[in-house]
Image (cartoon, grey):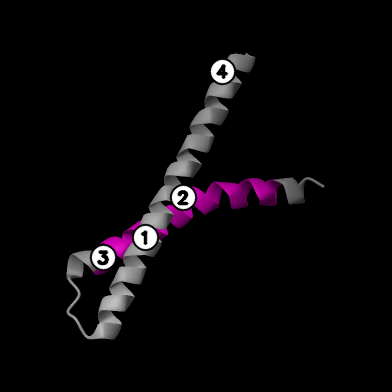
Amino acid sequence: MAFISMVFASIFIGAILFGLLFLLIGIILNIIWHVKKKKGQETSRALRISARVFTVWGLLQGIGPIAFVAVMILLNR
C-alpha cells in the first residue's frame, strides 16, 4: 500500500515538474516575442500562439495543483 502511494506521489510530482517546464518555455517564448516586437521585427503567428499556449498550460499544470493542495490545507484548519 505504501509502494502504490509513492508511485502516485511520484506521478503527481512529475506532472508538476513538466508543468513548470512548460511554464519556463512559455516565459522564454514570451520574452522572445516582446523583444522582437520592441525591435520592430515581424513576429510569426506560431510564436505568439505557442507562447500563450505554453504559458497557460504551464500555469494550469505546474501552479494549479500546488495552489489546489494549498487551498485544501488552509480550508481544513
Q: CA distance from mark 4 to mark 1?
A: 33 Å
Q: CA distance from mark 2 to mark 4?
A: 24 Å
Q: CA distance from mark 2 to mark 1?
A: 10 Å
Image x and y of residue 18, in percent: 42, 43
Q: CA distance from mark 4 to mark 3?
A: 39 Å
The reply to whether dot 1 and dot 3 touch (C-beta < 8 Å) is: no
Image x and y of residue 36, in percent: 26, 77
Amino acid at circle 2? Leu
Earlier residue among tags 2 and 1: 2
Image x and y of residue 31, in percent: 36, 70
Quadrant into which the N terminus falls: top right
**Residue for badge 1:** 26
Does the magenta-highlighted stretch encompass residue 7? no
The residue stretch that appears in magenta = 48-72
The reply to whether dot 4 and dot 3 touch (C-beta < 8 Å) is: no
Q: Residue furthest right?
A: 77
**Residue for badge 2:** 20
Earlier residue among tags 2 and 3: 2
Of circles 1 and 3, which is in front? 1
**Residue for badge 3:** 49
The one of 46 and 25 positioned closer to us in this rendering: 25
What's the mark number on residue 9?
none
Within-10-Å neighbours for mark 1: few <14, some 14–19, many 20+: many
Of circles 2 and 4, which is in front? 2
Earlier residue among tags 2 and 4: 4
Within-10-Å neighbours for mark 4: few <14, some 14–19, many 20+: few
Earlier residue among tags 4 and 3: 4
